[in-house]
Amino acid sequence: MSTDHGLRLCEHQVGGHMTKESKPDTLVDDAGRFYKPYQGDARSAREVAFYQLDLMGLRAFVPRMFGTAEVAGRQYCVMEDVCHGYLQPCVLDVKMGFVTQYAWATDAYREKAKDQATTQSSMGFRISGLQVYSQQEGEMKKMGRSWGKTLTQDTLHQAFTLFADNGALTPGQVWAPTSPAIVRLQQLLAWLEQQTSFCFFQGTATSLDTANLQVHFIDFAHTFPTPRTPDLNVLTALQSLLALLAKLSDQR
């Protein structure tokens, strides 16, 4: 795959590492592609394989996968940059599921799990990061994973209020029952209610652009096939998220 399209550091990533050991970790290019480092173990191979499946109803929520490429001696998964074309992309990453670790995970993976230390186990989701452009202040506000870890059941709503209250719209408008955001989340919920093929550990719901909000479902390195079993872990987590957003829809 050609990679000569103005490769540069991905500035709009909020939930992961933009740099690692002072070197770019995730990249984007002018062709609208996002470069995610290819992990040497089974994770990236599993994610690439998932993207290549016939995902049917989920396809509308999943970025396109272009394959893999080598850049400066390093392998990357190359997929659609869903923020491409946005001058000031507003992004909210929500890690879904009451449980993000699984019985057959490695000890190293289980040690990194943050379920009990965050709102993951109590609410079913936690904030991985967000950035929002304030039209009133004329600047981008960015909150990372460390900030997300400080949120509790009582303060978790602040992330969704901050993301939605950008000076152009109110949280009540962004999270209204008939808003693009809620309609898309309800569509994702409907798909989860009928699918019995996968369980999604560490899946992320990403919201983009408060004015015409999109919802994407990403991060499939820990997605596994299941024998005709619904993924109640993520399904009930999304129901919990929608319940929280329903309360915010009353804000003006």
Image: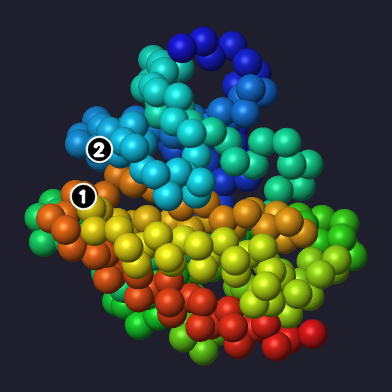
User: Is residue 50 something one can see in this rendering?
Assistant: yes
Total marks placed: 2
Helix or strand or loop: what does disc 1 sit on? strand
Residue under circle 2? 46
Q: How is the image coloured?
A: rainbow
- In which quarter of the view is residue 27 placed? top right
Foreground pick, 78 / 105: 78
Residue 113, numbered circle: none
> Residue sitting at 43 percent across and 65 percent down?
190
Residue type, numbered disc 2:
Arg
| Quarter of the picture holding the C terminus | bottom right
Using residue 89 as the reference point, say whether residue 167 is left or right of it. right
Label placed on residue 224:
1
Q: Position of residue 7 (x, y in %)?
A: 60, 21
**Which residue is painted at 40% across and 29% down in the image?**
77
Residue 128 in picture, x, y percent from top left: 48, 61
Q: Residue 100 falls in which quadrant of the image?
A: bottom left
The relative height of residue 133 versus residue 79 in the rendered view (above or below) is below
N-terminal-most mark, 2 or 1? 2
Q: Is residue 118 left or right of residue 176?
A: left
Is residue 142 visible from the viewing direction of this image?
A: no
Q: Are marks 2 and 1 in contact (CB under 8 Å)?
A: yes
**Quadrant of the rendered structure where residue 48 is?**
top left
Residue at disc 2, secondary structure:
helix
Q: Is residue 151 above or below residue 187?
A: below
Side of 41 relative to 96 (left or right): left
Q: Nearer the viewer, residue 141 or 187?
A: 187
- Mark 2 to mark 1: distance in Å? 8 Å
- Where does residue 111 sit, x and y in percent of width and height? 21, 61
Q: Amino acid at mark 1?
A: Phe
